[in-house]
Amino acid sequence: MDSIISRVNKTRLYLEVGMDQGKVRVTVEGYGDIYVEKGSLLGRALEGLGLVSLPCRGQGLCGLCRVEVLSDGLSSPTERERIVLGRELPRVRLACQARVTGYTRIRVPEQKPGVRLEKKFMLPRLRRLYPIIEILDLKPGEKPVDVDLIVSSGLHEGRRYAVTYGKQMINSTDKRPDNMLLVDMGTTTLTMIKVGLDGKARSSLVMLNPLYKYGLDIVSRGEKASEDQRVALEMKRTIIETFLRIADQGTALVLAAGNTINTYLAAGLPVESLVEYPYQPPVRGSILVPVNPPVILAPTIAGQVGGDMLMNLLATQHMRVKKPYMVIDIGTNAEIALVTEDEVLVSSAPAGPAIEGYVGRGSWGGRGGVYMVEVGGTDKPVFRVHGDPRRGFMGSGILSLVYGLYVNGFIDRSGRFVRGYEIIGGVKAFVIDRMNNLYFTQKDLREVQKALAAIKAGWKIVLEESGLSPNELSRVIITGRPVQSLGRDIVSGLGLSPARRTKIMANLVPYGLHLYAFSARYRGLARRLIGMTRHIVLAGSRYADKWVSSLRLGPG
């Protein structure tokens, strides 16, 4: 029988139809039989046929190469599959992680584009572009370029185009670069947007932060890095290599912003001063990592308030939000900033991962799941679920559920389950979808209460330090993945905002990164904002007392 030859990215993948020695048959429903080497990755074969895409380059982080397993001859699930797929295993696998060991029959679900531009990302419109980098044409025999040279392992003579940053040449390429990769380094997820040098967005990708295996919160990661230098170097290599895999041959620069610990881990800098009081970074400027393509890490502000909040502030300044106003970026590490005419007060609250989906039946943003739950009923709750209950609760689904249970009287202000719950395995739980085993326990609620209390205590202390009352704020901007699908009533009703004048906005970090990448004015504004900041450390008895009093559900 004839061979099936598939060309992918100038390479050839031979999939022989026939019982050749050392090859295993895989039946793909709707396509037919293919034969692959025993022990080879299923994803490589399917990508070669154009049946799946591997936008995270096979790291098992984006979850976009799912296949349904009808007859299982695959290797055991990997750790990353357990994180990304959860209870979908073993009937669903990630093709990029699964190796073929015996006869396998699969179904490939209808694929959404692996790299896509999501509507929830907003980018500014700039009349003129002044990119952070410049592309120079190094024509042989002409006058030398007057710039300092940074030599890296990926830089050598004979290349045609130079990438310059300020007065420094940071890379050279054979192909003229035509894009930049903007990265929001969240504690739980990485959001990446590829933009052309004309400022227009091309594609985007949300994936699990590969540092999850070192801890679900930034402090745990920082402590591990400070205790073992080998672990710290491994973390740097992991995050930088992830950036480079997503970049392409036309990427001139990776520009990333994140909280301070994530930034220092990516740079390979010591983090000891960030995990112990007074939690201050030794430097606050931008950091250049000389790889190919080069990586620039945006400046951090103070403590655990990093470049991601700085990008939020650039975005709100561009939107001309009237001062004084507050920005709260909801996430595992919630960052708070209060902007007045004279200063910028900043702080960070250790909310923890519960509100990002890390509960008993939780999910995360890139994987998908339940993003909203409406609650009704009297004696027993009636649930209307939005999203995919098979994959569990996303952060917004958890917050909307807690709000609905609270306002309908199924839980009280202390967080105690009052009525309408069941006992499952000796534990109180609300059953949201019995068929899909979707439930929410008393323990889950306690973790969410801790997160909400951390954020409420944070904004209360920042307001006290400023001498302002909530009514004096012109606006409170709430941003972050866990709140993007929520209404103002839920956000205010859970106490995530100190004022009714609240505006919930999509992730603003890409917006700010775009300004920083393409506007010299806003790069200058970033430096001025850093100079205006006053850092408030949430520690000691004052914070502890505020946190305990904020454990009660409801506003304020």
Image (spheres, rainbow, N blue to C red):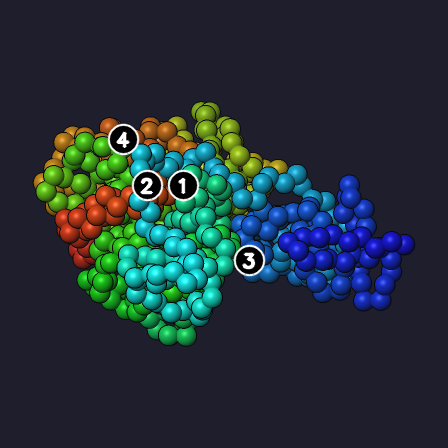
Q: Which residue is at 83% across, 55% downward? A: 3
Estimate the spatial distance between the alpha carbons at disc 4 and disc 1, rounded to whole Å: 34 Å
Disc 4 vs disc 1: which is toward the camera? 1
Q: Secondary structure at mark 2?
A: loop
Estimate the spatial distance between the alpha carbons at disc 4 and disc 2, rounded to whole Å: 32 Å
Q: Which mark sits nearer the N-terminus, 4 or 2?
A: 2
Location of the C terminus by quadrant is top left
The answer to which of 417 and 37 lies nearer the viewer is 37
Q: Which residue is at 22% across, 32% downward? A: 321
Q: Which mark sits nearer the N-terminus, 3 or 2?
A: 3
- Against 529, residue 161 (above or below) is below
State yes or no: discs 4 and 3 in contact (Cβ < 8 Å).
no
Rendering coords of residue 277 (x, y %): 21, 64
Given the image, on which type of amino acid does mark 1 rest?
Asp
Given the image, on which type of amino acid does mark 2 rest?
Leu
Badge 4 local density, few (<14 within 10 Å), some, or many (20+)? many
Q: Which residue is at 79% across, 50% downward? A: 27
Q: Which mark sits nearer the N-terminus, 4 or 1?
A: 1
Residue 59's disc is 3
Rendering coords of residue 197 (x, y %): 41, 45
Given the image, on which type of amino acid does mark 4 rest?
Thr
- Against 474, residue 15 (above or below) is below
Estimate the spatial distance between the alpha carbons at disc 1 and disc 2, rounded to whole Å: 8 Å
Given the image, on which type of amino acid does mark 3 rest?
Gln
Q: Quadrant of residue 316?
A: top left
The answer to which of 110 and 253 lies nearer the viewer is 253
Disc 4 vs disc 2: which is toward the camera? 2
Badge 1 local density, few (<14 within 10 Å), some, or many (20+)? few
Left or right of 326, for residue 53: right
State yes or no: discs 1 and 2 in contact (Cβ < 8 Å).
yes
Residue hosting label 2: 129
Residue hosting label 1: 198
